[in-house]
Structures are given as structure tokens and as C-alpha cells.
Image: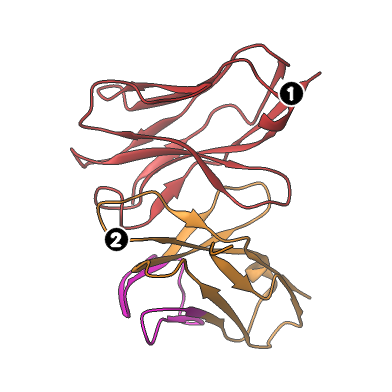
Amino acid sequence: AQTVTQSQPEMSVQEAETVTLSCTYDTSESDYYLFWYKQPPSRQMILVIRQEAYKQQNATENRFSVNFQKAAKSFSLKISDSQLGDAAMYFCACPYSGGGADGLTFGKGTHLIIQP
Amino acid sequence: DTGVSQDPRHKITKRGQNVTFRCDPISEHNRLYWYRQTLGQGPEFLTYFQNEAQLEKSRLLSDRFSAERPKGSFSTLEIQRTEQGDSAMYLCASIPFQGQETQYFGPGTRLLVL
């Protein structure tokens, strides 16, 4: 099974500021997907952004973007113009095995606090 | 709303009892996944199905755990002889087909074993 490491148990950012959440992973696959999921308190997991490993270009979804460094196996999430609704647990995920449709391995998560 | 649904949302049981959870994936999603999430941790992969076939099981899925998806639609996860260490959130997710890897998660079933 693959591994995912999120080294920041908690991060705090002022509203409207930018914050970056870090993630490193380990996989033996050459073609795979990487994901950031958000889990608000007592609510279900929702996808924030995903990256296909064969694509050089970093994925972007509105205020969310990633810095994907394939050789370093690094996949950080940048949230710009932070909003109160961004407060949640954020989980980085890579494939449990295979390229991505065979289940996911998640990190332990980063608790993001937005200060008004 | 046609998202992934799970039932029950909460379950309290005594150690040694059997429990069964149900997951209804999004209609026509052919892959279905089960995860376990303990407090303060990320979800851990348990098993997944493609239609009715169970294709992979993690080492976390001990002999006391069994999952089925008999008609390729809803799935059940049964835990026999529950232990206090089974207390966790059990999450279900689905995708429409391989090649569309984004998983859609249900709200989870929170299990407490006393």
C-alpha cells in the first residue's frame, strides 16, 4: 500500500489571506491521480481538487491550486483569499494501489482554521 | 438529491454483537468503496467492488468483517462480534466507472461499541 504524509496537523490563516497545506506521498505507479478532499465538521467528504500525474500543468479550481512536484512526490494545496467556509479538515490522498480507481490512501489530515 | 446514502447514520452496540451497515451509491455508479475513519485520522481503505465483484480487500478487513454487493447496486458491511476497537466512522464512496476516479462520499455511519 502507498503512504501519504501531511506534516501539518493544524494551520491557521486570516480571512482573505493565502495558506498552503503540504503533502508528500509514496507510490510505485507511474500514472496515477492525486486528490485533496475537504471534510467540514460533521459533514461529508467532498473533493477540492485533483491532479493527474501525467500532466505537467498544476491543477487549479477557482481559489484552490496545487503545486505538484512528481519527482519529489510532493502535492501541496494553496488556498487563496481564504473564506470562513474553508474551515475544515483537509485530506491529501493517493491511490491505495494501482492508478486511482482502486481505493485511496489518505493522510492524517490538516485542520484548517480561518480567523475572521 | 441522488448522492451516496448510508444507513444508519449512528449505531451504538455492545461488545460482541453483530452490526450491519448499508450503502446506496449514486445510481449507475459501478464502483463502490468502504473506508473506516477513526477519530483524528484520515479514512483507511477497507475494500471495494466493481459491480457485484469484490476486487480488493485491505489487511484491515479482518475475518470478522464481511462486505457484499449482491446485485451490483447497494452494499452491506457486516461486523461480527464487535470489539471496542471497531468504534469508528464507516464511510462509503462510489465512482461511475474506472477512468472517472473522483470518489463521491456518503455521510458515513458512526459506530460506537460499548
Secondary-structure class at tag 2: loop
- As displayed, is residue B41 above or below residue B10? above
Q: Which residues are magenta?
A: B47-76
- Relative to residue A15, is residue A26 drawn left or right? left
- Relative to residue A73, is residue A111 drawn left or right? right
Crowding near pointer 2: few (<14 within 10 Å), some, many (20+)?
some
- Tag 2 residue: B97
Rendered location of residue B59, percent (x, y): 40, 66
Residue occupying image coordinates x 25% and y 22%: A71
Residue occupying image coordinates x 60% and y 71%: B6
The hue in which chain B appears in the rendered picture of the protein: orange
Rendered location of residue B112, percent (x, y): 74, 70
Check chain identity for marks 1 and 2: say if they share one.
Answer: no
- As displayed, is residue B35 above or below residue B10? above
Query: What's the CA distance linking mark 1 and mark 2?
Result: 36 Å
- Relative to residue A13, is residue B20 drawn left or right? left
Query: Disc 2 residue type?
Result: Phe
The residue lying toward the viewer, choosing from A80 and A112, is: A80
Query: Disc 1 residue type?
Result: Ile
Q: Is residue A113 visible?
A: yes
Residue occupying image coordinates x 70% and y 72%: B84
Q: Is residue B59 visible?
A: no
- As displayed, is residue A90 above or below residue B85? above
Residue occupying image coordinates x 68% and y 51%: A43
Secondary-structure class at tag 1: strand
- Tag 1 residue: A114
The residue marked by circle 1 belongs to what chain?
A
Q: Which chain is red?
A: A
Q: Residue furthest top?
A: A17
Rendered location of residue A24, percent (x, y): 41, 29
The residue lying toward the viewer, choosing from B15 and B68, is: B68
